[in-house]
Image (cartoon, rainbow, N blue to C red):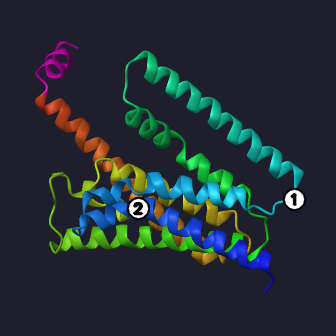
Amino acid sequence: MGEKKKRLIKSSTLLVLAFATAFFSRLIDSVGAPSMINFIHFGTIPAASLYVILKSQERDPRKIRAAQALLFSLLIFFGAIITSALFNNAGVINAILSYLLWVEAYFFLCSVISIPLGTDSFLSLKTWVARFSIFHIGLALAQKVLLDVGIMRVGKMGILQDNIQGVFYLSGGGHVVGASVSISFAIYCFSQPSMSLWLKILVFMAATREIKNTLNIILENTHLTYAHDPYIQENFLRQ
């Protein structure tokens, strides 16, 4: 195996590990890990992405221009964040964390662009992200069953469906994020001609199940808001 191929495979492994620090942080935290685990991705994703970008062997001029344009946009946005922080007397740490919250996904995207299509590295990255997504959907379905039979207890969030969050378990908006990940992966599956039709349908059905849980939560929260808000009740009765 040549040196170039070794470097590419190492790049994909680095990106997969960095992605995992963000994707599984809430799940690891829920089983007793220190809460600091939720912040590790602020360092791992930018560092891994920067390494892959600097070591990139991409020669496609269109992809190079796209990566350069994206990096230039991120640099401008960084300048805007720092300027805003200076005018508002915000701390440097707060400014940096705010910046990373907005852009770390784009850093990761830029690193993916920097990997030549069709290489073992790119295919490996796609495979692992797909595995993570399937695990997330399977975990959400398992949570639904365990909650229904009473093995898993409903946590601080009193609504049963609010605890069906997949790998984003016990996070405030985990059901929304989890449903978004599931349906995005289902749409991705239908764009893959090599994937069997039965598997596409199975993933789509599982993803729509999670979407249904999220809609139930929205309806339940709307009902609770109406039931406990005298102002809403009064204005509703007047109508």
Majority secondary structure of magenta residues = helix
Residue 201 versus residue 6: which sits nearer the camera? 6
Query: Taking 213 as reference, is 147 above or below it?
Result: below
Residue 107 x/y as whole percent: 60, 49
Residue 129 appears in the picture as rendered: no
Residue at left offset 29%, top offset 69%: 143
Give yes or no for residue 37 being in the magenta stretch: no
Q: Residue furthest bottom?
A: 1
Query: Element type at marker 2?
Result: helix
Q: Earlier in the sequence, mark 2 or mark 1?
A: 1
Three-letter code for the amino acid on which mark 1 is drawn: Arg
Q: Position of residue 21 (x, y in %)?
A: 44, 63
Magenta-drawn segment: 229-239
The reply, left or right, for residue 102 in relation to residue 191 is left
Q: Which mark is residue 217?
A: none
The residue labelled by disc 2 is 209
Q: Position of residue 129 (x, y in %)?
A: 56, 68
Q: 130 or 183: which is nearer to us?
A: 130
Query: What is the crowding at mark 2: few (fewer than 14 residues within 10 Å), some, or many (at least 20)?
Result: some
Gap between marks 2 and 1 measured at Cα? 43 Å
Instruction: Find disc 1 in the rendering and name its residue.
Output: 59
The residue drawn where x is 19% and y is 32% is 225
Q: Nearer the viewer, residue 93 or 229?
A: 93
Q: Are marks 2 and 1 in contact (CB under 8 Å)?
A: no
